[in-house]
Amino acid sequence: MKRIFLVRHGETDWNREGRFQGQMDIPLNRTGLGQARAVAETLKDVSLDRIVASPLARTRETARPLEELTGLPVEMNGGLVEISHGLWEGRTAGEVEAEWPGMLAAWHGHPELVTMPGGESLADVQKRAWPAFLRTVEEEGESVMVVSHDAVLKVILCRIFDSPLSSFWRFQLANGSITLLELSGKGWRVPLVGEAGHLGSVFRRVEQKAL
């Protein structure tokens, strides 16, 4: 049986400020670095075979503490990079609404219909991320940690659950959260989604406006 630990990267200053990050290479802040260490402590006793991450700094930094504990090198997978928010990147939700009136409401109401100005749609992300994820699953190793981003992990979960992309907002994955997938001859099983007990209270979640 394959076990895949999906980890969303730790917090950045732009997460805290409510700015759309997309493919901008923003590092973890102090909180995010602490979340990365908490993830490593949680998974250090799991017999991992591989660590795979998006090439952006915030995912590499999230994987690094576990790399140091286990000695496993972090493998980069460009297909797992975050959705391109295009012209929204670096802007707050308020700034986006001011420049593109009504588009933010459409993104939150019908995300499957929106293509970011100069960026990607969820279908674009799923088209590249799902094959990249499957290649990771099919390659060597029975237990793999995959560190990626909010939109990427959600479109992967939509495929796992056979859900349309309109279900995108039904998943809530906190920074530093862990989702466990298992694959056997019977197909996919999902024992955990967005587990965040290692970060403190599971019931206190900060809503991020730039998603």
Image (cartoon, rainbow, N blue to C red):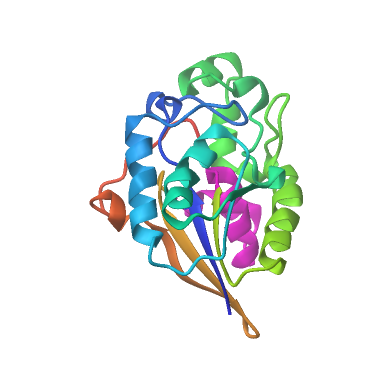
- Front-most of residues 97 and 55: 55
Answer whether residue 62 is visible to the viewer in this image.
yes
Farthest front residue? Answer: 71
Q: Residue at x 29, y 55 (%)?
A: 198
* Residue 211 higher or lower than 19, as above or below: below
Q: Residue at x 67, y 30 (%)?
A: 116
Quadrant where the N terminus is found in the figure:
bottom right
**What x and y, as percent, mark residue 162?**
64, 67
Answer whether residue 172 is visible to the viewer in this image.
no
* Residue 90 higher or lower than 79, as above or below: above
Q: Most prominent secondary structure in the magenta stretch?
A: helix
- Front-most of residues 131 and 207: 131
**What x and y, as percent, mark residue 27?**
48, 28
Q: Residue at x 23, y 52 (%)?
A: 201
* Residue 96 higher or lower than 53, as above or below: above
- Stretch in magenta: 148-173
Whether residue 161 is in magenta: the answer is yes
**What x and y, as percent, mark residue 156?**
62, 57
* Residue 176 higher or lower than 179, as above or below: above
In-image side of 129 versus 198 (left or right): right
